[in-house]
Image (cartoon, rainbow, N blue to C red):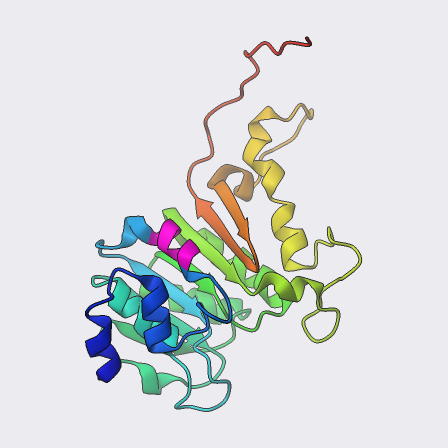
Amino acid sequence: MMNDTRALFSFNDLDKLAQIYKTDKFGKHFYTPHYQFHFSKFKYKKFKMLEIGVGGHDNPIAGGPSLRMWKRFFPFAQIYALDIFDKSFFQEKRIRIFQGSQIDKSFLDKMIEETGELDIIIDDGSHINEHVIESFKILFPKVKQGGIYVIEDTQTSYDEGYFGGDNKNFNNLKTSMGFFKSLVDGLNSEEYRIEGYERNYYDKNIVSIHFYHSLIFICKGNNNEGASSNIAFSRD
């Protein structure tokens, strides 16, 4: 209750809200300035967002700081979350929490049947590279046009232990960074001069990708501006 009272005076400042609710999105990391920039268009809209990972590991009454931060920052948003552990303790008005695996396609499909398409998805889950990539493949098609998919803690791309990263081959497609870097050329897929090439789903539906320290934003939209083949390039 005290945090909510303090947050009333900082509802437009994600940095301060992160500190009030004690989420590591500011301090340990410096994600909130980027969130403030990319999410500003949603501020006073009625929309749906999902955060993968509630926090607190297997403790049923630990976690949830970022959910409370989002609720205060977005006054009209419906906030969903999922976690492998039971985090129903943190459910309240405008916050609903599902229990399940972020790579269980059957579970995720059923969850989306209940929530409907989402405007924002934030992956702050296991951070295991394989999980991050698989979750994106399943859930990105469920994001609305104009929506944003976010990956946190991409430093695990370089952790060769538990998280399955690679600290030698930075283009390894099995790592989060390697996979998402491989999608960048698709922004220009209409310019390819490859006979028989068929643009894939990501080519057609990603309009921008923004890389920050340990953080990626993938913006969804119709990538169909057409080729620039009629432009004459000077060789001077």
Q: Is residue 207 above or below residue 144?
A: above
Question: Quarter of the image containing the N terminus?
Answer: bottom left
| Quarter of the figure with residue 195 | top right
| Residue drawn at point x = 53 percent, y = 54 percent | 216
| Residue drawn at point x = 43 percent, y = 54 percent | 34
* Position of residue 18 in the picture relative to residue 163 (left or right): left
| Quarter of the figure with residue 161 | bottom right
Residue 150 among those drawn in magenta: no
Whether residue 113 is visible here, answered yes or no, is: no
Position of residue 202 measured from the top left corner of the image (x, y, whole percent): 54, 43
Q: Is residue 39 above or below residue 192?
A: below
Q: Is residue 184 above or below residue 218?
A: above
| Residue drawn at point x = 33 percent, y = 87 percent | 89
Position of residue 228 measured from the top left corner of the image (x, y, whole percent): 54, 18
Position of residue 121 measured from the top left corner of the image (x, y, whole percent): 42, 60
Residue 36 among those drawn in magenta: yes
Between 6 and 204, the one nearer to me in the picture = 6
The range drawn in magenta is: 33-39
| Residue drawn at point x = 57 percent, y = 60 percent | 214
The secondary structure that most of the magenta stretch takes on is: helix
Whether residue 199 is visible here, answered yes or no, is: yes
The count of marks equals 0
